Amino acid sequence: MNATYPTLLAPLDLGFTRLRNRVLMGSMHTGLEDRAADFPKLAAYFAERAEGGVGLIVTGGFSPNVSGWVKPLSGSLSLPWQVGRHRQVTSAVHAHDGKICLQLLHAGRYGYHPFSVAPSKLKSPITPFTPRGLSARAIERQIRDFASAAARARDAGYDGVEIMGSEGYLLNEFTVPRTNKRKDAWGGDAARRMRFAVEIVRQVREACGPDFILIYRLSLLDLVEDGNAWADVVAQAHAVEAAGATLINSGIGWHEARVPTIATSVPRAAFTGITHRLKPHVSVPIIASNRINMPDVAEAVLAAGHADMVSMARPLLADPQWVNKARAGRPEAINTCIACNQACLDHVFENKHASCLVNPRACAETELIYRPAAVSKRLAVVGAGPAGLACATVAAERGHQVVLLDAATAIGGQFNMAKRIPGKEEFHESLRYFSQRIAETGVELRLGQWVDADALSGFDAVVVATGVTPRQLDFPGHDHPKLVSYLDVLQDRVVPGKRVAIIGAGGIGFDIAEYLTHAGPSPSLNPAQWMAEWGVDPDYATGGGLVPPRPEPPARQIWLLQRSAGKPGARLGKTTGWIHRATLKAKSVKMLGGVNYLGLDDAGLHIEVDGSEQVLEVDHVVSCAGQEPRRELHAALLARGVQAHLIGGAKLASELDAKRAIDEGSRLAAAL
Ligand code: FAD
Ligand code: NAP
Ligand code: SF4
């Protein structure tokens, strides 16, 4: 028994097989599933997680036929010749004593292609294609396709399958009145609506035999109108268990739901109460999911009896050694997923391979390798922001002698400001992780000293990671005391008044607007308040589990402005931008695009929008107008003939984010 996490690391006996612990690596599409040529990379990606000690892995979704594709030619297991490529994955995982299930996912009306099908001919709000309504015969064919794909998965060496019954995909579409308008034997009352899903479980069990893991991912909380009522969820759980499910996994929220379910602002383990509610109704083990990212959170969920296993996908992208580190009682060494979605889900939605902001090796295991250095060099890295931290620690891990210098008294650069934004508390974890890495890898840290070129003699190589400075504005009145920068606000030099205009509606402008509209503790640390703000019904009184949202009143009146036309926030992350816009809308923030700044004086900020002039009578104007690279040190080094490497914001401030900073720092260090 593990002394620190006794429940989390206890084995789970499934009768015919035993899982080595209670950690399920949840299904997540990486983009490596779609082409046979990428399977060696997919195998390496899963192999690292199996070696890292995960109890059971679930692959990204594979469709059982063409109509189930997520997008054209996305990963499927509908043909016999597709089996071979999967053997690379299963044997790589088994080589590390891991177990792996294939997820069978039929996208239904979420399919981004013209062959999509659904229980009824109803277009989803998030895809442009109207699905074909399935005939009764076509439904029978779909069920058979699931069973044959599951049998192929068994042939390919998988230990089981997960049947995707949540998130608003085909099976979930059958189960709810919102999308199932059928009047035949597959629609109408709850029993007929769930028949499709239950029949799939039954036939998959029949096709694969009794000693094959069958996980059913059940939508416990649809978070859309006309979703399932609680009694329907319980009835489905009973029925899939009776039909042969080995484990029930939790699905929370449809993709079209207007409630965030996995973003960083969602409180940790926010939805495990609902898994707990289901637990007494079933006898198979039940799996909790969503925003569980650290072992203490997982242990608490399991020890409280809320679930029998926890599912994590992104935390294992961030750190493949998560389980081994927990087992060793070293949670402080875990590279924590900050739930930003920037390199994982946002990439997938942009048709790129997934990776991870805090771990650029995720899904690049065969290409970005931190080999021991042939010769140990003496390196200076100036700037302990994300770029410098990644560079220094990877270089030291490879065997270089690294000195990391920063003028500030703490590591982290701009992350020290990001962590102060309500809903971005997870950024504290990255700073803790890097402190630990500095200690483990033997980086020599020198803080609190401004570094000039004189201080950098005697090194074999110098890396300049000096970041950025805020862009100065130059319209009339830019020197008025009402104009402050985001740094003044986040470093507590200024407490803005009750009416504030923000210039610049990029990531930082949005963050400042959230910071200034919130009063008191962050809702992300208070699940009950967070649920009320987003309209999640703790009593589950109606189908779907929604109630009218009750946002807290804003602490200030905010105007969020940008010069470009169009809606502010259009360039924010694909999977999180809507959350930021909705949060600010709920706080009555006035967002204006196409703004011309005419001047600032005692009366306020003079602007022109759509040809008409107005004065915003504000107490302060906060400039969030982007940044310029900070390169004085690099220029001084060049003047002395020292060729220094430039990374992060110091290299290029436009389009900079922490993903690029960490990626550049890591890749440079891998090559030094
Ligand atoms: P920096 O973080 O700017 O670090 C540079 C460091 O160099 C500083 O610590 C500075 O003290 C030091 N330095 C500079 N010159 C010298 C010198 N001569 N001597 C000694 N030390 C020196 N990015 C995201 O991807 N996602 C987000 O959600 C996100 N949220 C953010 C929220 C806020 C409020 C802010 C301000 C930024 C946010 N960012 C976010 C941006 C992200 O933090 C930056 O892209 C990232 O920090 C850039 O890393 P860097 O290492 O290049 O530079
Ligand atoms: P940004 O996203 O480039 O936004 C800068 C804003 O300032 C834009 O709205 C720009 O739009 C405006 N602007 C630029 N020059 C201006 C000028 N001369 N006068 C007035 N307005 C001007 O940069 P940022 O907000 O500073 O963020 C920095 C980086 O951190 C970004 O790359 C961002 O992705 C990252 N970040 C990410 C997140 C996240 O949640 N993912 C959060 C915070 C920061 P107009 O020109 O249209 O006015
Ligand atoms: Fe987590 Fe962000 Fe990495 Fe995705 S990119 S796994 S959300 S840290």
Image: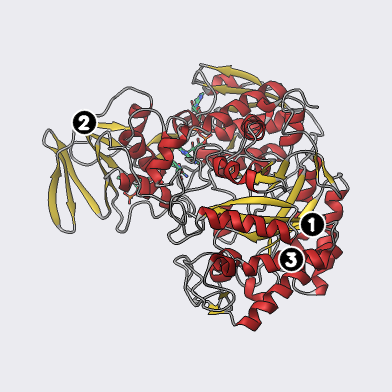
The residue lying at 19 percent from left, 31 percent from top is 480
Question: Within 10 Å of the Cα at label 1, are there few (<14), some (14-19), or many (20+) other Cα atoms?
Answer: many
N-terminal-most mark, 3 or 1: 1
Note whether 279 is above or below 489 in the view shown: below
Q: How far across and down, in percent of the image, does residue 285 sit?
A: 71, 45
Secondary structure found at label 1: strand
Near-viewer residue (653 or 81): 81
Residue tagged 1: 160
Disc number at residue 202? 3
Q: How far across and down, in percent of the image, does residue 613 sit?
A: 12, 51
> Disc 1 residue type?
Gly
N-terminal-most mark, 2 or 1: 1
Q: How far across and down, in percent of the image, does residue 167 sit?
A: 56, 58
Q: How far across and down, in percent of the image, does residue 493 sit?
A: 32, 22
Question: Within 10 Å of the Cα at label 3, are there few (<14), some (14-19), or many (20+) other Cα atoms?
Answer: many
Query: Is label 2 in contact with label 3 (beta carbons under 8 Å)?
Result: no
Question: Within 10 Å of the Cα at label 2, are there few (<14), some (14-19), or many (20+) other Cα atoms?
Answer: many
> Disc 2 residue type?
Lys
Near-viewer residue (378 or 552): 552
Disc number at residue 482? 2
